Image (cartoon, rainbow, N blue to C red):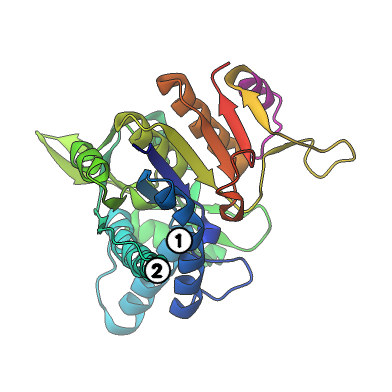
Amino acid sequence: MGKLVVVALGGNALLRSNQKGTYKEQIENVTETCEALMSFIKNGDNLIIGHGNGPQVGNVMLQHEAGAKMFEVQAMPMDFCVSETQGSIGYMIETGFRKVLSQHGYKHNIVTLVTRVLVDANDPMFKNPTKPVGPYYDKEEAEDYAAATGAIFKEDPKGRGWRKVVASPKPLEINNIELVELLARQGNIVVTAGGGGIPVVEKDGYYVGVEAVIDKDLASSLAAVQVKADEFYILTDVPQAYINFRKENEKALGRITVAEAKKYLEEGQFTEGSMAPKMRAAVKFVEETGHDAVITDATSLGNPNAGTRIVKR
């Protein structure tokens, strides 16, 4: 019997930096990534997929803004935009994977669950929102939007303008995670917690959405812990994590322990907003389950020695 594997797809699995984001580009990228994921299916593993949505949710926010300006169509809040991209990206993953499965002679159900993820309303990140989302504005536009909506805007450090910033709270609970595990262990490919999940808080015994963005690697790591996964993979655009990145003494990391990973994190070896959250998500999974986590790119899947493998000891 195969393993239960959770894979968190990075943004490059959907959209590359030099692309415009057309449907054709994205579906081709997704299909290519699904081809790489076939190594798990051929191994008899059960598969759960998480994914990012950064460029896609930014585009949705632009579309909402244009509709509000031109046609007075009400723009939707952040949690609604995340739910939109969960559905659309899930559709593309289902489409791409179905094609690849058919080409290889496999028949698997593929299920996308629009997933809410619980966060703490008192999470300190809500008092200091730092996650930039949506389009860039000039200072006057940003001030007008802030006055009209109460949103917080901060200037981009690279001088590209001002952007709305929201909190990035810690994920606490994946909604319907028992169903996710059940479906996956029955042999279905399950797509869940897309874009980190729809951020919700508990209020008066039910959930309400909030203006926030949950880190997709942390959410996928939490899902992997809660379904008792045997392995956790984080796919990114490099084959391994590095220390002394882009320096003369750059070193690719192969097999490292949790203690080593924590040491490198404390030293600032990994960039915030890039490799650092991936390494923290991997460490969380290994610490809580004792199983391995792997950070690599999609093309390296199928090679048991590829990537950076984080182990307990």
256 above or below 296? above
Q: Quadrant of residue 38?
A: bottom left
Mark number, residue 96? 2
Which circle marks residue 34 in the picture?
Answer: 1
Q: Nearer the viewer, residue 250 or 69?
A: 250
Rendered view: 187 above or below 31:
above
- Identified at 32% across, 59% down, the residue is 86
Query: Which image quarter holds the N terminus?
Result: top left
Residue 120, how many percent across, how many down?
Answer: 29, 31
Residue 141 appears anywhere in the view: no
Looking at the image, is 268 positioned above or below residue 77? above
User: Which span is picked out in magenta?
Assistant: 260-273
Give the left or right position of residue 194, taking residue 15 as reference.
left
Disc 2 residue type? Gly
Q: Which amino acid type is marked by label 1?
A: Cys
Name the side, left or right, on which 25 lies relative to 88. Answer: right
Q: Quadrant of residue 94?
A: bottom left
Residue at (28% x, 46% y) in the render: 210
**Between 259 and 118, the one nearer to me in the picture:** 259
Q: Name the residue furthest bottom.
A: 70
Could you tell me which residue is drawn at 43 percent across and 52 percent down?
Answer: 42
**Left or right of 313, for residue 107:** left
Is 234 inside the magenta-drawn segment? no
Query: As drawn, is 25 to the left or to the right of 241?
Result: left
Residue extending farthest to the right is 248
Q: Nearer the viewer, residue 126 or 3?
A: 3
Q: Position of residue 64 (x, y in %)?
A: 34, 71
Gap in angstroms between the C-alphas marked 2 and 1: 7 Å
Could you say whether the residue bearing mark 1 is in a helix, strand or loop?
helix
Instruction: Count the marks.
Output: 2
The answer to the question of whether label 2 and label 1 lie on touching residues, with beta carbons closer than 8 A, is yes
